[in-house]
Amino acid sequence: MSASEPGGLETGVTRRTVLGTSAGMAAATIVAPHLRANAQPLPTPSETGTTLRLSMSVNGSAVALDVDSRASLLDLLRERVGITGPKKGCDHGQCGACTIHLDGRPVVACLTLAAKADGRAITTIEGLATGETLHPMQSAFIDHDALQCGYCTPGQIMSAVACVQQGRATSPDNIREFMSGNICRCGAYAGIVAAIETVAAETREG
Ligand code: FES
Ligand code: FES
């Protein structure tokens, strides 16, 4: 039986026709090209990663291990070396929770290939204290209540140390600018800026 469109126009199309046509189109779509007559076979997918032997210093200890060339430095540290201070927040370079120092400069470990750390020195939050004595920035964060849940804190402190070391902690605005890549969902920013100002002042006074 024919169907009619709004306005009574006969289309000659029935529900059975539509369903039959759709099924036929779907069947044509799902037949993989390499199964069609005369089609060339597709190349066999292959893994593109290779295994690299890497050596580096992590918080002063020599580390050598075989690593997939595609691994991030954050995954290497957390899952292979057991250094869990750097946190995985976004894994996209947008929150700063994974901030570490690579040869003394702050980097987001989630966007850094592990291979780039070969032969270099890594410092994480675990490497800041000297024995039982906290780094001044760690103490300042405690003194200024610069944290609540603490998830962002390792990355905040690593960036804060770099902020002072690079002479960028010259005003609250400059501190906020330098620290803008480190997100704190708890909103502990006032304490963080105060902690950095304190350490910067102590550093200037020697
Ligand atoms: Fe690396 Fe967010 S986890 S920047
Ligand atoms: Fe909770 Fe910063 S202290 S996210």
Image: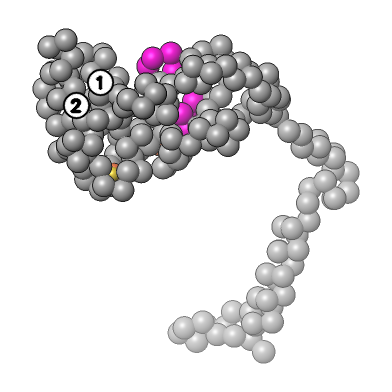
User: What is the quadrant of residue 203 in the picture?
Assistant: top left
- Disc 2 is placed on an element classified as helix
Q: Position of residue 196 (x, y in %)?
A: 19, 26
Q: Which residue is mark 2?
A: 196
Q: CA distance from mark 1 to mark 2?
A: 8 Å
Q: Determine whether, in the image, residue 18 is placed left or right of residue 117.
A: right
Name the residue rendered at 14%, 25% in the picture. Answer: 198
Name the residue rendered at 37%, 21% in the picture. Answer: 130
User: What is the quadrant of residue 193 in the picture?
Assistant: top left
Image vertical order of residue 133 relative to residue 28, above or below: above
CB contact under 8 Å: marks 1 and 2: yes
Regarding residue 160, the answer to whether it shows in the image is no
Residue segment shown in magenta: 102-112
Residue furthest out toward the right: 37
Q: Determine whether, in the image, residue 189 is placed left or right of residue 131.
A: left
Residue 61 versus residue 94: which sits nearer the camera? 61
Q: Which mark is residue 163?
A: 1
Name the residue rendered at 81%, 35% in the picture. Answer: 43
Q: Quadrant of the N terminus?
A: bottom right
Image vertical order of residue 125 relative to residue 60, above or below: below
**Ligand 2 falls in quadrant:** top left
Q: Amino acid at mark 1?
A: Cys
